[in-house]
Structure formats: structure tokens, C-alpha cells
Image: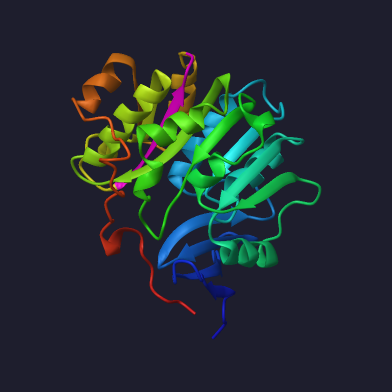
Amino acid sequence: MTEHPSAILKLSGYRAVIEPDRWVPGSFTLIVDGTPQSHVNLEDPSQLFFEYIQRIGHVVDQLRMPGEPLTALHLGAGAFTLPRYIEATRPGSRQQVVEIETDLVDLVRAHLPLPRNASIRVRHGDAREVLGKLPGGLRGEIDLLVVDVFSGARTPAHVTSLEFYREAVALLKPDGVVVANVADGPGLAFARGQAATMLAATGHVAALAETQILKGRRFGNVVMVGSREPLPMDWMPRLLAGGPHPSKVVEGAELRNWIAGASIVTDDTAVQSPPPAKNIFQVGNRD
């Protein structure tokens, strides 16, 4: 029986393991605390596997001119799937990744090396704390800020509030975008609150997800896209056409109706995202 590369993360105590994808040669899945967190195709980093990552990839594709380098900040490293994608599709991009679990970064770098010559800098620490310590020269210079912070299968409360999003948005260029991966279940109380909060911080928000998830019928990921400038309307059919299907983009008046009066989340009211049922994402020990 093959022993896959793994580590016990000192901060959280979770076990992280890297498993090869038996169906896609050159691809690997990072699993943390039994939950698949990242999928990487080392032979072709432009190929994205998880549905929510594909949707974020479609948003990235709409920014600037095709192939134009971006300045990106990623809160949450995982296996560096999106930084690898941006480097593959937009060579020369400047990227910074913030990750609190240093052992996780060491594991990934040792067994899933980053592309040579890629400008990807890793900053260790809590995502929100690091936001306040970034060089002043980055303020107002970020094209894309990705919020994909998880402790196990849940998003920590302190990166879900209006205060947090305002800190993040202050780093963006006037037309830069913040993209958040929001996991929620039936009823979507947490996701609707996140949409209301991001809308208050940015002024313009769209939500992307599989149709049944947006209807609140099952647990899944909703990708929230926010900007201080109106999101170009020609984005919407392109984001839909890119799949995975069936899918929907909610924005404008429809988004406000979807929020349905959910309260804006503050530091005083923030809670972590709800846990998924174990049979949704978790996998057994397959060593």
C-alpha cells in the first residue's frame, strides 16, 4: 500500500495528505481533515477541476485583456491552484499568497513544486492580520483579491465581516475585483449574509453557482464577485457559457431579491460558515 505525502499541521492539528488523481495523469488532490481542498494538474495548470474553482477561473479570464499579467492577492493557499492557473494563462503576473499553516505550504512546495520563475510570494500568517501589514505600495494596486480561507471545511468568522471586506477592498484598483468562495447549505442564510456584506463593501456584486445551490436546495459553493465599479454586463453570458452546467449568475435587482433582507455581517455578529454533512465532501483515509 502506497504511503502518500502527508503532514500533521501544527497550528490546527489537521492531517493534510496529497493523493494522486487516478483518472488524470499528472494531477493531485490535497485533502485536509478529510476534505478535498485543492486539485492541481502539474502537467497543465490551466486545467481546473473543482466546480467553484472553474467559476473563479472564468472570472479571472474576464479581467483586463486576455493574457495580460495581473497583480493578484490570494487569501488561503491550498495547493496554489489559482496562482498556478494565473501564471499559466497570464505569464508575468505578480502574485502574493497568504497562508497561516506553514506546514501546509512546506508540504505542497516539496511535492507539488511551483512553476519556475513564477512571481508568487508567500506570506505566512492569519489572512486578516496580514492584510493590515502588506506594503503600502500594494494599496490600490490589486487587480484580483481571492478570499478562499478555510479551517478544515469551514470559513473562520473573522474573514466574513464588513470590516474585513472593507480592508480587502481598500487594496483594489478602482476597477479591481474581490472574489470569495462561500460554502453554505439549504436556506443559504450564511451565503445571503455574505452577499449583503460584500455589497455594502463594494457596491456591485454577482453570485455564481450551480442552479440548485442558488435555490438553497443543497449544500455547495457560491462564488461571490464584488467591485466598486459596475461589473460589465457582457461578463454574465460568458460566465454562464463557461460552465459547469447547469449554472446561474445573479446580480443587480435579482441579487437584492436573492439576499432577501439578510443582515450585513459585522465583527460583532460574524460566525463561521456552516459545516457540510460528512458525506458531501469528506473522504476516508485511503493510504
Q: Position of residue 157 (x, y in %)?
A: 34, 47
- Its colouring scheme is rainbow
Q: Where is residue 137 in the image (x, y as percent from the top left)?
A: 69, 30
Q: Is residue 241 above or below residue 219?
A: above
Seen as rendered, the residue at the extreme bottom is 1
Residue visible at 52% across and 62% down in the picture: 30
Q: Is residue 269 left or right of residue 139?
A: left
Q: In this view, does 77 lie above or below 55?
A: below
Residue visible at 37% across and 57% down in the picture: 153
Question: Which quadrant of the view contains residue 33?
Answer: bottom left
Q: Where is residue 188 in the image (x, y as percent from the top left)?
A: 23, 39
Residue closest to the eye, 82 or 44: 82
Question: Which quadrant of the view contains residue 216?
Answer: top left
Residue closest to the eye, 107 or 65: 107
Q: Where is residue 95 in the image (x, y as percent from the top left)?
A: 67, 40
Seen as rendered, the residue at the extreme right is 117
Q: Is residue 172 above or below residue 101?
A: above
Whether residue 143 is visible here, answered yes or no, is yes
Whether residue 46 is visible here, answered yes or no, is no
Quadrant containing the N terminus in the rendered view: bottom right
Residue 245 painted magenta: no
Residue 225 painted magenta: yes
Q: Main secondary structure of the magenta part?
A: strand
Q: Give the range drawn in magenta.
A: 220-229
Q: Give the mark count.
A: 0
Residue visible at 47% across and 36% down in the picture: 55
Residue visible at 49% across and 19% down in the picture: 235
Q: Is residue 4 above or below residue 148?
A: below
